[in-house]
């Protein structure tokens, strides 16, 4: 169970289609296709759907929860969602971003609305649904439960600017049940190069639940940036387990006093991604934990126990419920739940009289989430009765140990009835009489004489001379040669014009690129920009420098743009972190306050320009 895994690896995927970097040779085609699509009437709301998401489902009173509402199938940013269940929260907006993707000629558009929630009281709340009204129709999202506690975990002891916390969702569990092991890195300083070593414990299986999440929280009255990672812990045997501390290694960068004039105290040398950084390696350890694993009880265990542990539901569906003799119906059974879903057995239909049953390959789906491992298994059978009548398919059952009720339970489907009616009789097709001529041959067989039964619509020519074109249709005169020469001439003119236009476009783009950095430095020199102004200045610089048209630019997109244009990894990561800090300042309501990051960002831009030359 022990292994080391890197954290925060740079994204290496390409930017989504419709945004990011498009090769010049394809830019015009993509732009024309997108404009043509957007001009089609009513296409914006063709397949609209709304999805609501929270960055976590458990938080403390002092925490800020990120909520996103994604409206797919439209780019209409004026259609603001209305979210139910927010009466007990302070709500601030985090902005709106639209996306357009063109894949195989199909355009997929969506709008993301971001909000930040601050709880007003403790309790369990249902957030949602979110509703969006578009062109006279209302679209509704899902709902999510959110549990708010009074305070974050705290012991009353100050732990410093950075520490690692480990928790189990429950102190005890049954064999093959699951508990959630949560690791949280609390920090008030910058870090890089994170790697995690999980504890070792024979008899315990640890499976990662999704990707790490980041958010802001309060611990013992101090505000921290939190990196949270969750794992499912599944014991294979009973007993008491001592879970050793998890260890996380990283480089830690301590803040310095910028008022000092020592050149080596310059923030340039303090950045974790430059060679002169003063970051120091550090390894943090979490608390050791104990887990008590209980055996599954013998009392009440049903015969043929499936071995499932958790909570499961079963449903069935027969389609159609009435067929003709010789036809087939499909019985679908789906077992879903949370627990050791890989142990879901393959069910079997008992033998039915005068019926043939053909089983399809079962489909198992495992879907980990922040609460543990969930999944489903779908099983299908083709039922083919041999004669008419009424056929009853008995219930199908599966047993499991319910960890919440701490008892064995049997889940079963309802019996379904298949009605089979008599099929239609098909009359034999009479053979067409043959036209015979002449008497029998010496061998006793008959010969048929070929007869002309009719004529084709178009005449059949029996001679080559019939295919000769009439004399008045022969090409002659100057007009004919002009018609033949026109296509190559038009193609050559179009190609030359396209090259001239491309070269002029390249020259214009190069001129804009040379002026982009100068305009950025001028704006930063003339006045002290707040976080909002500085973030906008960086977006304007990147758009002008690389001839882009990105209205909303995320830190990850900025990183991918710089890397694709040859900027060093460290420099691109540096700008990404700076943009992320600016976003944090804006989203916490301090976007209009004076921002001390202007010098740092200016220095990053100078280094970008140096590496692009």
Image: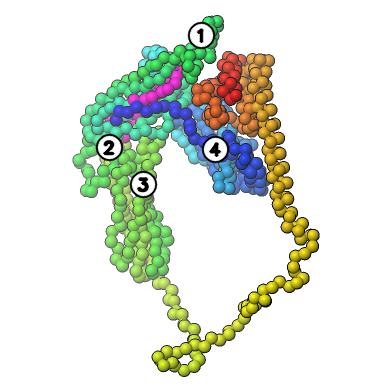
Q: Are marks 1 and 2 in contact (CB under 8 Å)?
A: no
Comes first in the chain, label 4 or label 2: 4
Q: Position of residue 535 (x, y in %)?
A: 60, 23
Q: Earlier in the sequence, mark 3 or mark 1?
A: 1
Which badge, 4 or 3, is on the more N-terminal residue? 4
Q: 212 left or right of 99?
A: left
- The span shown in magenta is 172-197
Residue 137 rendering spot, x and y as whole percentages: 60, 45
SS class, disc 4:
loop
Q: Is residue 131 visible?
A: no
Left or right: 480 with respect to 559?
A: right
Residue 432 in the figure: left or right of residue 111: left
Task: Say which residue appears at 41% left-offset and 23% top-offset.
Answer: 194
Q: Please give the name of the residue rendered at 79% of the width and 62% of the height, measured from the top-left corner.
A: 477
Which residue is label 3 attached to?
364
**Residues marked 4 and 3 touching at CB (< 8 Å):** no
Instruction: Say if 267 sits above or below 67 in the image.
Output: above
Residue that numbered label 4 is attached to: 16
Between the residue at mark 4 and the residue at mark 3, the CA separation in whole angstroms equals: 30 Å
Give the labeled residue for mark 1. Answer: 264
- Up/down of 4 relative to 524, above or below: below
**In the rendered structure, which disc, 4 or 1, sits on the residue that comes first in sequence?**
4
């Amino acid at each position: 169970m022990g292994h080391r895994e890197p954290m925060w690896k740079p994204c290496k995927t390409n930017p989504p289609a419709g945004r990011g970097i498009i090769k010049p040779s394809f830019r015009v085609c993509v732009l024309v296709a997108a404009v043509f699509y957007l001009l089609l009437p009513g296409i914006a709301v063709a397949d609209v759907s709304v999805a609501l998401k929270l960055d976590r489902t458990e938080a403390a009173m002092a925490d800020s929860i990120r909520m996103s509402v994604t409206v797919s199938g439209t780019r209409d940013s004026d259609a603001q969602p209305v979210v139910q269940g927010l009466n007990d929260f302070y709500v601030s907006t985090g902005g709106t971003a639209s996306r357009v993707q063109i894949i195989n000629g199909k355009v997929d558009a969506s709008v993301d609305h971001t909000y930040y929630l601050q709880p007003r009281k403790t309790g369990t709340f249902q957030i949602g649904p979110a509703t969006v009204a578009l062109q006279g129709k209302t679209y509704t999202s899902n709902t999510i439960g959110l549990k708010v506690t009074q305070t974050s975990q705290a012991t009353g002891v100050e732990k410093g600017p950075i520490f690692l916390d480990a928790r189990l969702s429950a102190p005890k569990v049954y064999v093959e049940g699951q508990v959630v092991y949560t690791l949280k890195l609390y920090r008030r300083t910058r870090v890089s190069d994170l790697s995690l070593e999980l504890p070792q414990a024979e008899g315990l299986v640890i499976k990662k639940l999704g990707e790490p999440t980041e958010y802001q929280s309060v611990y013992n009255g101090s505000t921290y940036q939190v990196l949270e990672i969750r794992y499912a812990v599944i014991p294979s045997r009973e007993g008491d387990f001592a879970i050793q501390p998890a260890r996380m290694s990283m480089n830690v960068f301590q803040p310095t006093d910028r008022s000092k004039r020592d050149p080596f105290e310059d923030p340039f040398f303090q950045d974790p991604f430059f060679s002169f950084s003063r970051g120091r390696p550090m390894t943090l350890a979490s608390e050791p934990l104990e887990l008590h694993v209980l055996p599954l009880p013998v009392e009440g265990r049903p015969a043929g126990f499936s071995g499932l542990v958790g909570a499961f539901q079963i449903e069935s569906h027969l389609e159609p419920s009435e067929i003709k003799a010789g036809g087939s119906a499909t019985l679908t059974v789906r077992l879903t739940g949370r627990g050791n879903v890989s142990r879901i057995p393959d069910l079997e239909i008992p033998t039915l009289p005068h019926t043939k049953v053909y089983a399809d390959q079962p489909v198992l789906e495992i879907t980990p989430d922040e609460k543990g491992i969930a999944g489903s298994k779908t099983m299908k059978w083709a039922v083919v009765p041999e004669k008419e009548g009424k056929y009853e398919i008995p219930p199908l059952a599966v047993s499991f140990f319910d960890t919440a009720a701490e008892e064995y339970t049997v889940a079963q489907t309802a019996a379904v009835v298949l009605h089979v009616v008599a099929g239609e009789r098909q009359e034999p097709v009479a053979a067409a009489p043959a036209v015979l001529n002449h008497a029998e041959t010496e061998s006793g067989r008959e010969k048929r004489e070929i007869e002309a039964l009719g004529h084709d619509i178009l005449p059949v020519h029996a001679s080559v001379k019939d295919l000769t074109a009439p004399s008045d249709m022969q090409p002659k005169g100057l007009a004919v040669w002009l018609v033949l020469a026109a296509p190559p001439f038009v193609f050559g003119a179009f190609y030359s014009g396209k090259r001239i236009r491309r070269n002029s476009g390249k020259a214009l783009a190069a001129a804009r690129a040379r002026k982009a950095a100068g305009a950025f430095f001028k704006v930063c020199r003339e006045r002290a920009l707040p976080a909002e102004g500085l973030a906008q200045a960086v977006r304007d610089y990147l758009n002008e420098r690389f001839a882009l048209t990105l209205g909303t630019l995320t830190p990850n997109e900025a990183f991918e743009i710089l890397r694709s244009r040859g900027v060093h990894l460290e420099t691109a990561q540096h700008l990404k972190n700076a943009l992320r800090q600016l976003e944090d300042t804006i989203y916490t309501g301090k976007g209009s306050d004076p921002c001390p990051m202007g010098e740092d960002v200016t220095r990053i831009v100078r280094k970008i320009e140096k590496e692009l030359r």
